[in-house]
Image (spheres, coloured by chain):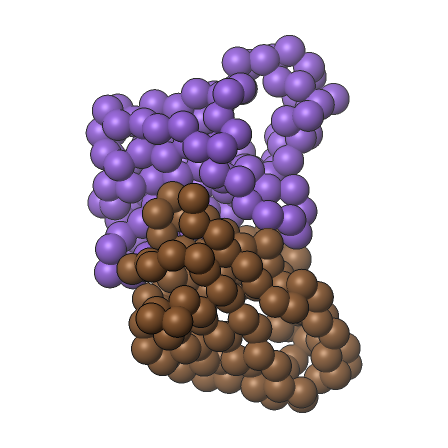
Chain colours: A brown, B purple
Amino acid sequence: GIQVEQSPPDLILQEGANSTLRCNFSDSVNNLQWFHQNPWGQLINLFYIPSGTKQNGRLSATTVATERYSLLYISSSQTTDSGVYFCAVAIGMRFGAGTRLTVKP
Amino acid sequence: EADIYQTPRYLVIGTGKKITLECSQTMGHDKMYWYQQDPGMELHLIHYSYGVNSTEKGDLSSESTVSRIRTEHFPLTLESARPSHTSQYLCASSDRNYGYTFGSGTRLTVV
């Protein structure tokens, strides 16, 4: 089946710093999403982005489907950005293992 | 407001009991899913459904069953709960234009 790899597995930032999270996938997909899981376990949909670039406030995402990767950018990070970020692709909705982000004040 | 609802939010139950976790969505989505997740870890697909009377097994389905009698309702049943079932269970539904929406989850503890 399709493989989804996220990097880095863990990331610690100082408040105000920028970061880039990466998601690689092993096969062509027509559906890719980025989620943020908050400390209460709720999965929040950040972007539905099978291709192209989208922006929402301090967050933006780019998917290059032909090269099988997607990037999530977080600018001017805040402590509330802490949590686990998951990339998920279609075909059985396979999730990556996540990037655990900690933003320190 | 269209959404996806899971009940109960928390459940503590004894070993050997039969339990049903409820999931309902008001978005009219045909596709629905159940995932199991230990805190902060990977999500594992348990079951999924592409519509009424359609159910398929995922990666961790052997100890649970699902049904899809109505579009909006997709309950998950554990016939005999064990401590190894202690985890968070997440229900989701999907739409081709907007992707997946998750419920708030059920945190299950089997003692």
Seen in the image, is A4 located left or right of residue A102?
left
Expressed as whole percent of the image width and height from the top left, the position of residue A32 reads 38, 61
Expressed as whole percent of the image width and height from the top left, the position of residue B110 reads 69, 24
Q: Residue at x 33, y 71 (%)?
A: A66
Q: Residue at x 24, y 60 (%)?
A: B97
Expressed as whole percent of the image width and height from the top left, the position of residue A4 reads 50, 56
On the question of residue B9 being in view, the answer is no
Seen in the image, is A80 located left or right of residue A33?
right
Quick check: B59 above or below A58?
above
Seen in the image, is B95 located left or right of residue A60?
left
**The C terminus of chain B: image quadrant:** top right
**The N terminus of chain B: image quadrant:** bottom left
Q: Farthest right residue?
A: A105
Quick check: B47 above or below A100?
above
A66 or A87: which is nearer to us? A66
B95 or B24: which is nearer to us? B95
Seen in the image, is A72 located left or right of residue A29?
right
Q: Residue at x 36, y 80 (%)?
A: A53
Quick check: B108 above or below B29?
above
On the question of residue A87 being in view, the answer is yes
Expressed as whole percent of the image width and height from the top left, the position of residue A94 reads 45, 49
Number of marks present in the image shown:
0
B40 or A4: which is nearer to us? A4
Q: Residue at x 32, y 77 (%)?
A: A52
